[in-house]
Each structure stands twice: as C-alpha cells, then as structure tokens.
Amino acid sequence: MKRLNVLCAGAVKGLVLALRPRFEAETGVALEATFGAVGAMRDALRSGAPCDVLIVSARMVDDLMASGELRAGSAKRIGTVQTAIAIRAGTRRPAIESAEALKASLLAASALYFPDATLSTAGAHVAAMLDGLGIRAELEPRLHMFANGAIAMRALADDPRDDAIGCTQATEIRYTPGLDLVAALPAPFALATVYSAALASGAGDAGDAAHVLAMLGGPSSRELRLAGGFDPEPAATR
C-alpha cells in the first residue's frame, strides 16, 4: 500500500486524524502522520525524515518555501487558532477576562501546563506572557513544560488538583478528553496563529499530497475545522 508522509503541528492533529479515514478510502493511500511542536516538525524535515506534506504555522511555511525546502506556491491555508486556557473538566473556571484577572488566576493555580517554549508557538508565547506579567520567577516551581501541547494537556487532564491550569492552542485543548476550554487569552496577550500545509520539495506523488491539502483547507472540512477550534476565515499570519 502506498504511503503519504505528513509532519504535522500538534494544533492540527485532531483535524488530520479526523480526515485520515476519508483520505485513505478515497485514495487507497495510507496517511502516515507524525505530530509535534512546529519547531520539532521543521527540524524533522531538515534532518531528512520522510515528508510529503508539512503542516505548521503559515509564517514557518513561508520561510521554508523561501529557502526551497517546501514547494513554492503549494501552500494551503487551514485556519486560525487562538491560544487559550484549559482546566480539567468540571472544575471551577478561573477568571481570565483581563490581564489583571489572568495574572491573579495564574498566581492562584497549583500548576501551569504548557508546551515547549523553544519549539512551539504557544509555549514561546506562554513564556513571554509570564515575563510580561512579571510572574515567571514566582511560578517557576509550578511550571510543567512538555514537548508539545498534546502531551502537556494530557498531563493536565491527569492532574488530580482542581486548581491546575493549562495554556496551549485551542485545538489541542478541544481534542484532549477530560478538559474544558475556558477562553482565549485576553488582550494584550491574545495570540491567533494561522496554520498552513504545503508540499515538501522532495514529495513523492504530488497528486496524493495535493488531495490531502485540498481536504485540509477546502470547503468540505470547514464545519469540522470550526468544531475543532479553527477559524477558517482569513487572518494576519503569526
């Protein structure tokens, strides 16, 4: 059976897994996907990992097309994802409607779960947010950083404490069982990240790769993307 290799940002994992059965039924091609932080997926591409399609932030896609590592003109926009706050399902929702409320809720939390601050978009933003609020040093003993948002959110779901908090991309929160999405981060810490998919320069069957790109960003998946936490409408890239 033919294979299509996809390196995919964790924020888009739920969408890829939901679309995989239809893609395989329509093409007869097995979709082999690896998920992780955007920086880790870029590094995997550069290290020679099998890749026909790369799904990362739109800004990173643009950079990799400019360097020739992705095929010029092949990018397909998937949608915009907000960085948001998560809690264990059924626990008290913290107040985060303003920067002041967010700061107080973070300081009151027993733990803060978030993805890698050097390789992931959301993780880097969380670290910068804590610095901006002036509370990173105080929270240091309660910070729990993981390789990507999916792992961080699973760890939050397993934390028995009712006052633990997570912060990552809204899509990763939505597809993790046992969590509730509180809300997107408030201004001035709100972050909307656009995700895109593109063909790797060394992609095998461009027809199969183009098929999955059309599914990811086309009208047939629009409702699925909305339900999963994407805003499919145009937005400024980050």
Image (cartoon, rainbow, N blue to C red):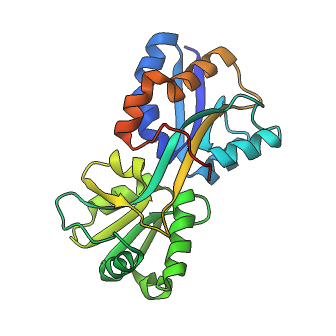
134 is higher (above) or lower (below) than 233: below
Q: Position of residue 123 (x, y in %)?
A: 52, 63
Farthest left residue? 90
Compared across the picture, whether 65 is left or right of 192 comes to: right
Identified at 71% across, 25% down, the residue is 203
> Quarter of the image holding residue 204?
top right
Of residues 177 and 103, the one nearer the viewer is: 103
Q: Nearer the viewer, residue 187 or 22?
A: 187
Residue 208 rendering spot, x and y as whole percentages: 61, 17
**Quadrant in which the N terminus is drawn:** top right
Q: Residue furthest bottom?
A: 138
Q: Position of residue 209 (x, y in %)?
A: 62, 22
Seen at 46% across and 85% down, the residue is 135
Q: Residue at x 46, y 68 (%)?
A: 187
Q: Is residue 110 left or right of residue 210?
A: left
Residue 172 can be seen, yes or no: yes
Q: Is residue 15 left or right of residue 35?
A: left
